[in-house]
Each structure stands twice: as C-alpha cells, then as structure tokens.
Image (tube, rainbow, N blue to C red):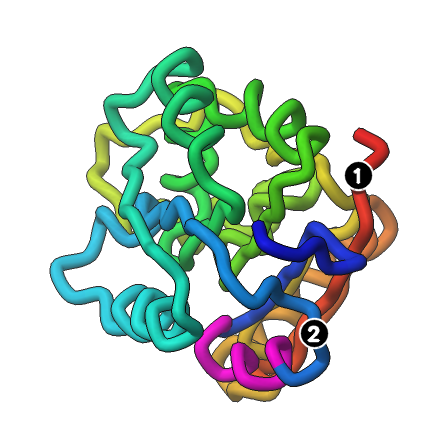
Amino acid sequence: MSDSPKYNLILTSSFNTVAGELREKSLLPKAASVAFIPTAGNPYPERPWIDADRKALVELGYNVTDIDLKGGSAESLEKELSNHDIIFVAGGNTTYLVEQAHVSGFSSVVRRLLGNEKMYIGSSAGSILAGPTVEPFVTEDLAELPKDFVLTNPSCLRLVDYVVLPHDQVEQFSAEHDKIIKQYGEQLTFVRLTDKEYRTENIYGL
C-alpha cells in the first residue's frame, strides 16, 4: 500500500454502500492491490452483491484480482495473497465460506498475512468470518446448500471476539437477528450492522 491507514480490519454489512465514506475518512489506502475472495457466493447462480462490491473497489482505483478459496491450499494461498495489500472477503453463504476457509488452509495463513501489514475487509459473510464462530447461522445457511454438504468446523478466523449481524434494519434479517441473540446472547457477543455501518479494528499485533 502506498500509505498505511490506522486500521487494518474493516468489517461491513455491505461494502459498496460505505466505500465512499471509508475513503473520505481516510480509512482506506489511496492505492492498493486487492485479493478479492468471492467464495461465499459460489452456491448462488446470481451474485449481484459481489459484483457491486467488486465494482466499488475498482472505482476506488484499486487493482482487483479474484482468488477463490475453493481448490486452494495453504501454501498456494499464502503465496498468492502475499502479493496483495488488501484481503477482501465478499458476502454470500457464510457456512459454505467457513468450510472452504478451513479446507483451503486460508484460516491458517490469514493471521500471518495480517501480521505483515495486510488489511482485511469483510462484507456481510466476510465480516462474520472474522469473528469466533458461524454456529448461529448454520441452520439457515444449510437450507441453501446441497444436502450432502457437511460443515466440519464451525470456528471462524477469530480476528475479533464478536459476531457481526449484517443487514440489520432490513426486516427479514432484523427478525432473524432477534432470534439469534435470544438463543446465543449468553454465549456470544453480537454487533448489529446496517448496510450503512461498519467497524474498524487495529489488529496489527497478531
């Protein structure tokens, strides 16, 4: 990156709706190479939210390269991702994303990469992935996945100690969030984010 913002972790509900504000507040670098991970969208034939986030990054002037976790290995991913300044994890099916993060080895290399002054940006599922677990979302996510899909490990990246609840104030999501908090509120810490909100963290000390 040509300059180093104060924060190296940005969690959003919908990146494309806050990209302008993030740039205005100097929370994003002026120039950067982005590793764009669209993996959470793999289960869906149409992925307009991923297209919108990718477009927003391009409009910021960034060089964007798609890197799918599916089929990757820890060695290949670390080599590929180390060539970029920003690791951007897009939205979609979080449970599928978590499984691919483990199978590919992404979950084992991301901390080393962030400790090397990379930036992590999550959008929706990508923000949930940064937390401790995907458990509150599994039942709903499985309904959108093949019947033979198996989640072997519900643990997420644990970059933060809270679980993001994206798209809050959208009626269908807000009602689901209420249920999740009621069920898991004593076990986990939750942060609700509307599509116009985000969280920034400094985790250079990993």
**Which amino acid, by three-letter code, is at mark 2?**
Ser
In the image, residue 121 sits, relative to residue 15, either above or below, namely: above
Picture residue at 70% right of the left edge, 54% below the top: 4
Q: Is residue 49 left or right of residue 193?
A: left
The picture quadrant where one finds residue 90 is: bottom left
Q: Nearer the viewer, residue 179 or 80?
A: 80
Q: Position of residue 155 (x, y in %)?
A: 61, 30
The picture quadrant where one finds residue 67 is: top left
Secondary structure category for the residue under label 1: loop
Q: Position of residue 166 (x, y in %)?
A: 58, 69
**Residue 47 in view (yes/no):** yes
Residue 26 tag number? 2
Picture residue at 33% right of the left edge, 54% below the top: 64
Q: Position of residue 71 (x, y in %)?
A: 24, 23
Which part of the image, by quadrant, shows the C terminus? top right
Give the Cα distance between marks 1 and 2.
18 Å
**Residue 182 in view (yes/no):** no
- Frontmost of labels 1 and 2 is 2
- Majority secondary structure of magenta residues: helix
Q: Position of residue 9 (x, y in %)?
A: 69, 52
Q: Is residue 2 left or right of residue 125?
A: right
Whether residue 111 is in magenta: the answer is no
Q: Which residue is mark 1?
A: 204
Picture residue at 44% right of the left edge, 77% below the top: 16
In the image, residue 129 sits, relative to residue 158, either above or below, namely: below
Mark 2: give few (<14), some (14-19) or many (20+) Cα within 10 Å.
some
The picture quadrant where one finds residue 160 is: top right
Secondary structure category for the residue under label 2: loop
Q: Is residue 7 left or right of residue 111?
A: right
In the image, residue 4 sits, relative to residue 182, either above or below, namely: above
Q: The magenta stretch spans which residues? A: 15-23
